[in-house]
Image (cartoon, helix red, strand yellow):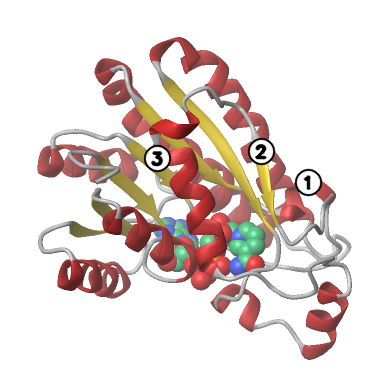
Amino acid sequence: MKFENQVAIVTGAGRGIGEAIARRLAAAGAKVAVVSRTESNSQKTADAINAAHPEAARPYAVDIADFDAVQSTMETVLKDFGRADILVNNAGVTRDNLAMRMSSEEWDTVLDTNLKGVFNATRALLRTMVKQRYGRIVNISSVSGLMGLAGQANYAASKAGVIGMSKSIARELAGRNITVNVIAPGFIETDMTAVLSEEIRKGAQSQIPINRFGAVEDIAAAVEFFASADSSYITGQVLAVDGGMSM
Ligand SMILES: NC(=O)c1ccc[n+]([C@@H]2O[C@H](COP(=O)([O-])OP(=O)(O)OC[C@H]3O[C@@H](n4cnc5c(N)ncnc54)[C@H](O)[C@@H]3O)[C@@H](O)[C@H]2O)c1
């Protein structure tokens, strides 16, 4: 099995893209810490994984924006599993609004979750990866962080920030056999995009050369590559998985 004896931590794994990533890594042999804000969601994903791969997953609930809570949750993960080979920073939220109308709270919620959250989880696990002299960190950004999208000043800033942070950490740790790469999904069919009006969906689709929204599996497949030994000579890179939208 590709990830035999490896431990993966996936944030935002209670549903959507994160759930697909957690399932895929478990199917390839990893033990998975399913981290989400909502306990019932992490439990549901962990149960589904364990039904197919007994004792492969454990659920954890934490607000990824809370530095201290994340450090303590990751300490528990390390106690439970003993190591941390793969970290997928996937938890994220949107609070879309035109910049002219955007509230301070909408700005803070998105930056605290999407940008600081990635720092919080990475910070909590880096020392262990350095000691192991092995780590694969995969951060989920967005096409919005590459191109900017109207109504997403907060979200685009957070996702562009993830790219800059990833490149910095990639440079800090390249010599320790730890890679940090970024996936920038386009429009993917999940709860996050289910709220879009028909008009916005049509407008978005018209900008996608492949002419459809992506599936969660499209992202999970790219994560599996960056999480594996196959990508050991790749670090600090951004892969757009967006049907050609940002080319
Ligand atoms: N769906 C898309 O079209 C799309 C496009 C580009 C990027 N993304 C990114 O992909 C990632 C997953 O998106 P999705 O579509 O699956 O979203 P989703 O809303 O379906 O799932 C998001 C997950 O993140 C978790 N989460 C949110 N805030 C959290 C917090 N404060 N602490 C801990 N967990 C938290 C939720 O519990 C949930 O499990 C996000 O980072 C998102 O920005 C999604």
Could you classify mark 1 by the number of other residues whose Cα lies within 10 Å: few (under 14), some (14-19), or many (20 or more)? some
The relative height of residue 211 versus residue 150 in the rendered view (above or below) is below
Residues at marks 3 and 2, CA–CA distance in whole angstroms: 19 Å
**Which residue is label 1 attached to?**
146
Residue type of the residue flagged with mark 1: Leu
Which residue does the numbered mark 3 point to in the structure image?
121
Of residues 102 and 145, the one nearer the viewer is 145
Q: Going 82% across and 80% down the picture, which residue do you hit? A: 200
Report crowding for label 3: few under 14, some 14 to 19, many 20 or more residues within 10 A (C-alpha).
many
Q: Who's the residue at 30% across and 43% down the image?
A: 2
- Position of residue 96 in the picture relative to residue 50 (left or right): right
Q: Work out whether residue 80 can be spotted.
A: yes
State the count of labels.
Answer: 3
* SS type, badge 3: helix
What secondary structure is marked by label 2?
strand
Give yes or no for contact between labels 2 and 1 (Cβ–Cβ under 8 Å). yes
Q: Which residue is drawn at 84% across and 49% down?
A: 247
Using the image, determine if residue 58 lies above or below residue 4. below
In terms of sequence position, does the residue under pointer 2 or pointer 1 come before the other? Answer: 1
Q: Measuring from the top left, give residue 121's x and y in whole percent.
A: 39, 40
The amino acid pointed to by label 2 is: Val
Residue highlighted by disc 2: 238
Q: In this view, does 141 lie above or below 49?
A: above
Name the residue type under label 3.
Answer: Ala
Q: How far apart are marks 3 and 1 (CA)?
A: 23 Å
Picture residue at 70% right of the left edge, 49% below the top: 240
Place of residue 212 in the rendered image (x, y in percent of width and height, measured from the top left): 74, 75
Which mark is in front, 2 or 1?
A: 2
Does label 3 or label 2 sit earlier along the sequence? Answer: 3
